[in-house]
Image (spheres, rainbow, N blue to C red):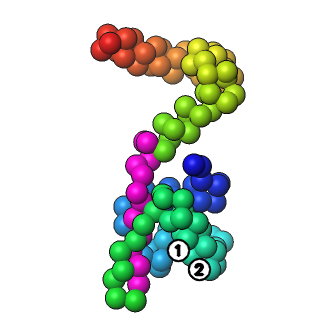
Amino acid sequence: MQLSKTEEELMNILWKLKKAFMKDLLESYPEPKPATTTVATLLKRMTDKGFVSYTAVGRSREYFPLIKKKVYFSKHVNGLIKNFFNDSPGQFASFFTQETNLSKKELEALKQLIDNEIKKK
């Protein structure tokens, strides 16, 4: 399951804070800040999707992520490769290296990362 753009924005705030009450979440948004009801709706949807949970603290709720950012991002990228690049990591890498205007230094750093992964396997 995937998050909408606005849900991802809120999830990034929650990943950064690790645990947060509504007031903490609202304070973390840039101006113009969303309405409390908007954030409450997003949290409800994200809870229903299994991305967020909360602990009741008195009459308040302390929210926390149920999925790690790295896990979500990994599933997102793998879905992107499957759906847009015919399940071919090679096509994805080709597109990524040619269409992102990476410098020679950045490409060499990527090559080093790939070489290190090859050595591990």
Query: 119 or 110, which is in the foreground?
Result: 119
Compared with 18, 118 (above or below) is above
Question: Which label belongs to residue 115?
Answer: none
* x then y, percent, for residue 73: 50, 41
Check if mark 1's residue and mark 2's residue have beta carbons within 8 Å.
Answer: yes
On the question of residue 81 being in view, the answer is yes
Query: 102 or 44, which is in the foreground?
Result: 44
Span shown in magenta: 60-71
Using the numbered discs, state the Cα–Cα distance from disc 1 to disc 2 in whole angstroms: 7 Å
Amino acid type at image mark 2: Thr
SS of the residue at dot 2? helix
Quarter occupied by the C terminus:
top left
The structure residue drawn at horizontal position 48% and vertical position 44%, both measured from the top left corner, is 72
Task: Report the side of 72 relative to 83 (left or right).
Answer: left
* Residue 93 figure quarter: top right
List the residue tagged with mark 2: 36
The structure residue drawn at horizontal position 59% and vertical position 49%, both measured from the top left corner, is 2
